[in-house]
């Protein structure tokens, strides 16, 4: 039968596996899942004709607006408008390539950081003091000790679940962005609407950057947790070292939950 020390060990050291899983999931894009990737491509191809129609509409609106403002009195404006049309159509038809290039750049950075964060040596937490204190306890004290440790174990399990949900949510966001990308790209042709297309690209880059922030948070957590030496509870029923471990795990949760908004701030999205 496992002791409460074994349970708390498993709860804390389980973050090693979580960080490894997070690193793997963060680097997974649409092309990682061939079956799903083909579905996304089919959705993309179904949306593409609609996006091209919108591109034409936005071009005509821009053309009429500039005609009424006599902007086409200059040949430079005409050439610029036609180049934008060709460029927007080219980008729209090769959206997969451009988005994948952005994702691969972020995956390269997360691989480098994640390789550091997945080192086993970072997670050698010292439980010897806690084990020694537990061994000296009587039967009743051991039961009370187990009862006191339960909330910490539950909190850690809950944090792991939320972190994985956020990481999976980011993957779904990447897939949806890739599928519907032709529609916002179509706005590039219209000067008054082009901000929508630019914001889409920045949002996609922010989702990719979110993965880097999550990995950095995991590495920082591992650096904190290795400096903690878990001991027994004090006479007041509190253990500052266990609370440090819980608070550092909650800080990691905060980083993961807020990673999306922080990434958007960094990219200006």
Image (spheres, rainbow, N blue to C red):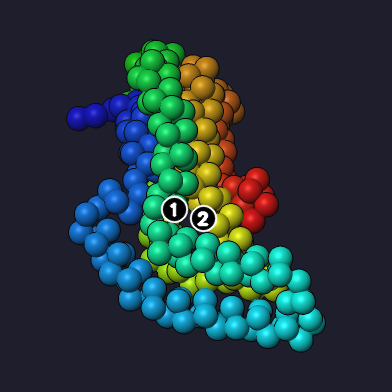
Camera-nearest residue between 123 and 269:
269
User: In terms of image quadrants, where is residue 51?
Assistant: bottom left
Q: Residue at x 27, y 58 (%)?
A: 37
- Looking at the rendered structure, the secondary structure element under dot 2 is helix
x then y, percent, for residue 190: 63, 73
For mark 1, give the secondary structure.
Answer: helix
Quadrant where the N terminus is found in the figure: top left
Question: Viewer-proximal residue, 267 or 214?
Answer: 267
Side of 163 where 66 appears, left or right? right
According to the picture, the residue beneath numbered tag 1 turns out to be 99
Dividing the picture into quadrants, the one containing residue 24 is top left
Q: Report if residue 222 is visible in the image.
A: yes
Residue named by callout 2: 204
Residue 161, image x, y percentages:
39, 49
* Residue in the picture at 53% in, 44% down: 209
Q: Is residue 30 left or right of residue 230?
A: left
In this rendering, would 205 be left or right of 264?
left
Q: Can see residue 168? A: no
| Nearer the camera: disc 1 or disc 2 | 1
State the quadrant of the C terminus.
bottom right
């Amino acid at each position: 039968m496992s002791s409460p020390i074994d349970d708390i060990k498993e709860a804390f050291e389980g973050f090693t596996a979580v960080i490894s899983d997070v690193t793997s999931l963060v680097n997974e894009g649409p092309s990682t899942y061939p079956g799903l990737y083909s579905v996304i491509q089919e959705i993309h191809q179904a949306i593409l004709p609609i996006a091209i129609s919108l591109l034409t509409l936005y071009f005509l609106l821009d053309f009429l607006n500039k005609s009424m403002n006599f902007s086409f009195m200059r040949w430079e404006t005409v050439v610029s408008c036609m180049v934008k049309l060709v460029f927007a159509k080219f980008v729209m038809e090769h959206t997969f390539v451009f988005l994948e290039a952005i994702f691969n750049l972020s995956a390269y950075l997360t691989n480098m950081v994640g390789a550091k964060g997945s080192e086993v040596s970072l997670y050698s937490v010292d439980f010897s003091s806690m084990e020694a204190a537990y061994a000296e306890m009587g039967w009743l004290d051991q039961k009370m000790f187990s009862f006191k440790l339960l909330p910490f174990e539950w909190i850690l399990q809950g944090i792991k679940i939320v972190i994985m949900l956020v990481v999976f949510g980011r993957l779904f966001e990447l897939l949806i962005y890739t599928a519907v990308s032709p529609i916002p790209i179509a706005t590039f042709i219209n000067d008054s609407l082009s901000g929508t297309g630019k914001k889409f690209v920045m949002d996609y880059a922010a989702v990719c950057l979110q993965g880097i922030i999550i990995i950095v948070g995991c590495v920082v957590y591992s650096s904190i947790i290795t400096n903690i030496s878990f001991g027994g509870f004090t006479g007041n029923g509190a253990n500052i070292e266990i609370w440090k471990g819980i608070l550092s795990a909650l800080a990691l949760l905060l980083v993961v939950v807020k990673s999306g908004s922080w990434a958007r701030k960094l990219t200006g999205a």
